[in-house]
Image: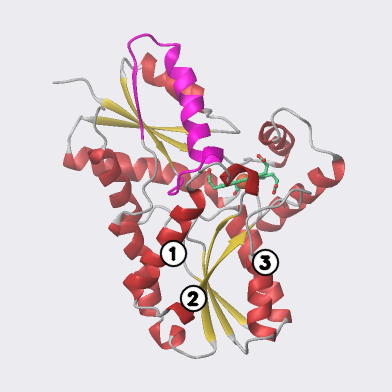
Amino acid sequence: MTEPTAVLLMAYGTPYQESDIKGYYTNIRHGQEPPKPLMDQLVGRYKAIGLPSPLARITTAQRDGLQAALDKAHPGAYKVYEGLKYIAPFIKDAVDQIAADGITRVIGLPLAPQYSSYSSEDYHNRARKAVEAHPGMEYLPVSSWWNHQELIHFWSDQLVAKKDLTDRPDTKVIFSAHSLPLRIIQGGDPYKDEVIGLSNAVAQAAGLNEDQYVLAWQSAGRTQEPWIGPDFVKVAKDLITESGMKTIVSASIGFIADNLEICYDVDMELAKAIESAGGTLTRLNMPNDSPALIATLQQVVEETKAE
Ligand SMILES: CC1=C(CCC(=O)O)c2cc3nc(cc4[nH]c(cc5[nH]c(cc1n2)c(C)c5CCC(=O)O)c(CCC(=O)O)c4C)C(CCC(=O)O)=C3C
Ligand SMILES: [Fe+2]
């Protein structure tokens, strides 16, 4: 039998317990400890959703689901690993484990559907650095995979199921993705265009007209520099108070899992803003470890060939 190929699933990571938050946040801040007010704010948000955030369990379930799907389609051909950016098991730990398992071919698959230098390229750089420590190991990076039909239909199926609601003149669908500092997308980063591409593809597959949906940005950091906007909280409030909308359907298409940005920024912050403006929020489910997401990841792996 030929040697299996490793599939390295890479994700942001999430603190498992309160005592992890400081180290995790310090890693996100490139080794700088967070000032107390920022730290307190983040602890407050994690406590509000309950630790660990569902993301920890979901990333592992995605790994297990992909392993089972690949085992069924190609017995013995792939071994799936989980490597995180800001908390253990780190990307480097996973690569070292792959080497210890005697595998020399690694597909690097970021669990972020759109490419950006902030997320995808940083995952690949961390993986490549770890791979270089193992002579003879080959690294095959996946850039982005937002345009897979299974993923597009995961979202559009939910909108089609809510057609009675979305067709009402006082309902608007808001697609959203994580904002980024404008400086990151300047100089040709495709992130924004890929998010626009996914939102339009989902809208088209769901049969939405251009006046039935908008794209906005969520979870921007509260820093001085400009971030991609408009922010989805402001967009939602304006739609209700100025454009006569009653229902907002929120689809966080830039993410694939329930996490802090979904459970807090959408389910608490956005929901509260909409309710206090007099409207109601309906939030679409995230792909998590659904068959559609696992099928998408399986296709991405099958399409990845040596260059
Ligand atoms: C583009 C993008 C994605 C999607 C792509 C991908 O998934 O890779 C993403 C995902 C995530 N971000 C996450 C958590 C955090 N991100 C932060 C901070 C930041 N994110 C940024 C961008 C992104 N973030 C940026 C530009 C910053 C500013 C700091 C900096 O310049 O580096 C902070 C610090 C505090 C704060 O600012 O809120 C936290 C705690 C979690 C885990 C949630 C959980 O635990 O459930 C997830 C999945
Ligand atoms: Fe983030």
Residue where numbered disc 2 is placed: 213
Question: Ligand 1 within 8 A of label 2's CB?
Answer: no
| Vertical order, 76 against 287 (above or below) | above
Question: Is residue 111 shown in magenta?
Answer: no
Q: Nearer the viewer, residue 282 or 117?
A: 117
Q: Amino acid at mark 1?
A: Ser
Task: For marks 1 and 3, give the one nearer the viewer.
Answer: 1
- Residue under the point 16% across and 20% down: 2
Residue where numbered disc 3 is placed: 268
Q: Residues within 10 Å of mark 2 (few under 14, many from 20)?
A: many
Is residue 256 something one can see in this rendering? no
Q: Amino acid at mark 2?
A: Tyr
Q: Secondary structure at mark 2?
A: strand
- Residue under the point 53% across and 28% down: 90
Q: Nearer the viewer, residue 209 or 26?
A: 209
Q: Secondary structure at mark 3?
A: helix
- Range of magenta residues: 112-141
Q: Position of residue 79 (x, y in %)?
A: 30, 30
